[in-house]
Amino acid sequence: MSSPTKKIILFDGICNLCNGAIQFIIKRDTQNLFLFTPLQSKAGKKLLEERKIDTKNMDSILLIDPNVAYYIKSDAALEIVKNLSTPWRFIRIFKVLPIGFRDFVYDFIAKNRYRWFGKEEQCMIPTPELKTKFLD
């Protein structure tokens, strides 16, 4: 299904904020480390099921690192930026904050993302040039 060396980012495919974040990551993934798939896709559902992740508690972003395990919420976001081009990787400094605080802020944004940024009726369809970066 995917290369065992690529990190996989699962995201809410109908969320405008999430889609914008994926476009941001793609432009700054200079080492070509990431593959992407919406949580709503067949591949996304399969990856969640294989890891026994409850989809009721996972609705925004998840990073699967084949050499580690997986990260959720603020840990996922900070692990992703760690792999981006400079200066974005320096955002990882927020890892020093307690996870409870980081996830509280993350959950607040996630809870309001549709209201603030809107949503689409269907998942983002990658351009032909970007199709190789997406699972499914």
Image: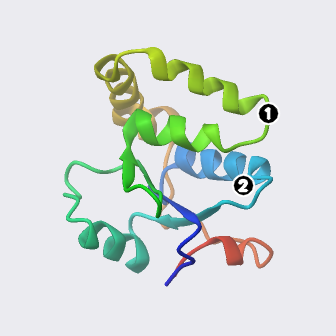
Q: Which mark is residue 107?
A: none
Task: State the separation of the CA atoms marked 2 and 1.
Answer: 14 Å
**Residue type at numbered disc 2:** Ile
From the top left corner, tell me how far across and down residue 120 is, in percent. 51, 57
Quarter holding residue 40: bottom left
Specify whether 99 is left or right of 53.
Answer: right
Q: Which tag, 2 or 1, sits closer to the chain's start?
A: 2
**Foreground residue among 6 and 126:** 6
In this figure, which residue is indicated by the disc labeled 1? Answer: 86
Quarter holding residue 34: bottom right
Q: Which mark is residue 26?
A: 2
Residue occupying the point 55% across, 48% down: 16
**Foreground residue among 17 and 76:** 76
Q: Determine whether 55 is above or below 44 in the image.
A: above
Indicate the secondary structure of the residue bearing disc 2: helix
Residue occupying the point 40% across, 63% down: 39
Q: Quick one: label 1, few (<14), some, or many (20+) residues within 10 Å?
A: few
In the orientation shown, which residue stands out farthest toward the front?
A: 67
Viewer-nearest of labels 2 and 1? Answer: 1
Specify whether 28 is left or right of 38.
Answer: right
Cβ–Cβ under 8 Å for marks 2 and 1 = no
Indicate the secondary structure of the residue bearing disc 1: loop
From the top left corner, tell me how far across and down residue 48 is, in percent. 30, 66
Q: Quick one: label 2, few (<14), some, or many (20+) residues within 10 Å?
A: some
**Residue type at numbered disc 1:** Thr
Q: Determine whether 101 is above or below 66 in the image.
A: above
Residue occupying the point 25% across, 71% down: 49
